[in-house]
Amino acid sequence: MLTYNLKKLFKLRGITTPASFLMKNGFGKQAAYRITGNRFSALQPEYLEKLCIALNCTPNDLMEWEPNKNIEKPEVLGLNKLRPVSVGDLRHFANDIPVEKMSEFISQVEELKKKIKNAE
């Protein structure tokens, strides 16, 4: 079944107040709270576009797919790209890095970001 994974995406982006974030990015108050509370049955294409722009992602990044038990060989389907991936809380990602190593850590993260960006 396809589901929206917006809470996970907000967490990945370090967004602690998703409704405020959405309102700052052009969503009305009611829409922002419906989206963050996962109280919607579908998102209009204009909302999908706004979300993708605000979160720097694609529509595929907004969704996850968990195959039903009656689907044979789900591993061969294109929807597999949307299978859930476990992600930790990135706000505390570097807490155990010694202060004297922090500049090295940051430069390596920046280097990795450049490599990822260039590969796109």
Image (cartoon, helix red, strand yellow):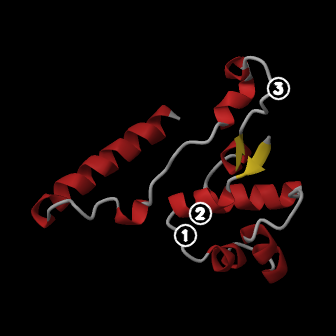
Instruction: Tell which circle, 2 or 3, labels the residue nearer the N-terminal end.
Output: 2
Q: Viewer-proximal residue, 79 or 20?
A: 79
Q: Specify which label sits upstream in the sequence, 1 or 3.
A: 1
Q: Which of 100 and 73 lies nearest the eye of the viewer?
A: 73
In the image as oriented, which residue stretches furthest toward the front? 69
Residue 117: which numbered mark, if any?
Answer: none
Is 28 placed above or below 57 here?
below
The amino acid sitting under disc 3 is Asn
Helix, strand or loop under label 1: loop
Disc 3 is placed on an element classified as loop
Q: Is residue 100 left or right of residue 94?
A: left
Name the image quarter holding residue 24: bottom right
Mark 2, residue position:
10
Evaluate if marks 1 and 2 touch, with contact meaning CB atoms under 8 Å apart: yes
Residue type at tag 2: Phe
- At 53% from the left and 35% from the top, the residue drawn is 120
Labelled disc at residue 70? 3
Could you tell me which residue is drawn at 79 percent across and 56 percent down? 48
Is the residue under label 3 in contact with that under label 2 (CB below 8 Å)?
Answer: no
Q: Amino acid at mark 1?
A: Ile
State which mark lies toward you, 1 or 3.
Answer: 3
Coordinates of residue 28 in the picture (x, y in percent): 81, 79
Q: Earlier along the polypeptide chain: callout 1 or callout 2?
A: 2
Would you say 21 lies left or right of 71 here?
Answer: left
Residue 63, image x, y percentages? 72, 47
User: How far apart in space, not on screen, are marks 1 and 3 (Cα)?
Assistant: 36 Å
Residue 15's mark? 1
**Would you call the spot at circle 1 few (<14 residues within 10 Å), some (14-19), or many (20 or more)?**
some
Separation (CA) of disc 1 from disc 2: 5 Å
